[in-house]
């Protein structure tokens, strides 16, 4: 897949994990899992589905006969053992429970279990993420800038939002609430590392979804700074000008992404 498609897949994957971890319930006796979304996550990994007895298993080989085995139920346990061993522990037939050794296995899985619940979801997320090629070049970013340019020219909110999503995923920008702007102006910025006690953001971006005006202020901004908030108000009223405007904002983000490329 292209870099853009892989990046969109990562954004979708991030949101999928967020929804799953926010809705899972891990209270003993009341465990609950969104199986529809978990199924989507499983399909993004390289695990292979197997139906064994009444169990839905997702497996992949590790070493020798040992497999990584996920049991698709509300606990979502992941084991490192054989498929037959998991079948015995999770769905024993009557003949198997006459063995003391087998009863111990059914009662205690500490020797083979790797994770369950949210830990398993995070493991699946990492497995799916590892399959995405998120490396990029200047040419890849140039294509994203061109899409953004077209969105601005056509005043397409859908295209502009997609361009924001892609660049913000690369650069870890996030919405910022300043509490002083009209609802049609949104602000995005990146938290500044070592910004001190006060929350500080760098490269604030201002977008008016009514007029389609887009601007970026170089440097930093803090919601706790009266000077910064005064500048923002003056910008919103047309009394101050952003350092970069329109497609220049996306060109700047592309340069920044290339500079900070892993």
Image (cartoon, rainbow, N blue to C red):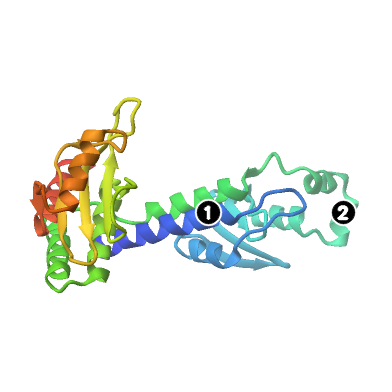
The answer to whether residue 2 shows anywhere in this view is no
SS of the residue under disc 1: strand
The answer to whether residue 163 shows anywhere in this view is yes
Q: Nearer the viewer, residue 163 or 60?
A: 163
Image coords of residue 110 (percent x, y): 70, 39
**Residue at which label 2 appears:** 97
Relative horizontal placement of residue 39, taking residue 178 as reference (left or right): right
Q: Residues within 10 Å of mark 1 (few under 14, many from 20)?
A: some
Q: CA distance from mark 1 to mark 2?
A: 27 Å
Image coords of residue 52 (percent x, y): 68, 66
Image coords of residue 93 (percent x, y): 83, 62
Q: Quadrant of the N terminus?
A: bottom left
Q: Residues within 10 Å of mark 2 (few under 14, many from 20)?
A: some
Q: Which mark is residue 61?
A: 1
Relative horizontal placement of residue 95, taking residue 129 as reference (left or right): right
SS of the residue under disc 2: helix
Image point (34%, 47%), residue name: 179
Label 1 vs 2, first from the N-terminus: 1
Q: Nearer the viewer, residue 12 or 83?
A: 12
Image point (54%, 57%), residue name: 20
Q: Quadrant of the C terminus?
A: top left
Image point (60%, 65%), residue name: 35
Q: Which mark is residue 177?
A: none
Q: Nearer the viewer, residue 21 or 66?
A: 21
Relative horizontal placement of residue 238, taking residue 24 as reference (left or right): left
Compared with 87, 198 (above or below) is above
Compared with 122, 56 (above or below) is below
Image point (51%, 48%), residue name: 122
Image coords of residue 95 (percent x, y): 87, 59
Q: Nearer the viewer, residue 17 or 127?
A: 17
């Amino acid at each position: 897949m292209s870099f853009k498609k892989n990046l969109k897949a990562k954004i979708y994957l991030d949101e999928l994990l967020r929804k799953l971890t926010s809705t899972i319930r891990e209270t003993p006796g009341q465990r609950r899992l969104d199986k529809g979304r978990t199924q989507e996550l499983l399909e993004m990994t390289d695990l292979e589905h197997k139906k064994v007895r009444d169990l839905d298993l997702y497996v992949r080989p590790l070493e020798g006969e040992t497999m990584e085995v996920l049991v698709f139920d509300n606990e979502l346990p992941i084991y490192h053992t054989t498929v037959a061993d998991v079948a015995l522990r999770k769905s024993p037939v009557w003949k198997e429970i006459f063995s003391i050794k087998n009863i111990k296995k059914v009662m205690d899985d500490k020797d083979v279990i790797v994770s369950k619940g949210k830990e398993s979801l995070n493991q699946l997320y990492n497995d799916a993420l590892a399959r995405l090629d998120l490396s990029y070049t200047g040419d890849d970013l140039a294509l994203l800038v061109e899409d953004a340019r077209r969105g601005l020219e056509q005043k397409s909110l859908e295209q502009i939002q997609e361009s924001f999503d892609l660049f913000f995923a690369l650069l870890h920008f996030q919405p910022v609430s300043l509490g002083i702007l009209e609802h049609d102006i949104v602000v995005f910025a990146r938290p500044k590392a070592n910004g001190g006690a006060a929350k500080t953001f760098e490269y604030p971006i201002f977008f008016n979804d009514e007029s389609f005006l887009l601007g970026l202020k170089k440097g930093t901004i803090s919601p706790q700074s009266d000077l910064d908030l005064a500048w923002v108000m003056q910008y919103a009223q047309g009394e101050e000008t952003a350092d970069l405007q329109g497609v220049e904002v996306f060109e700047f983000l592309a340069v920044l992404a290339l500079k900070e490329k892993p």
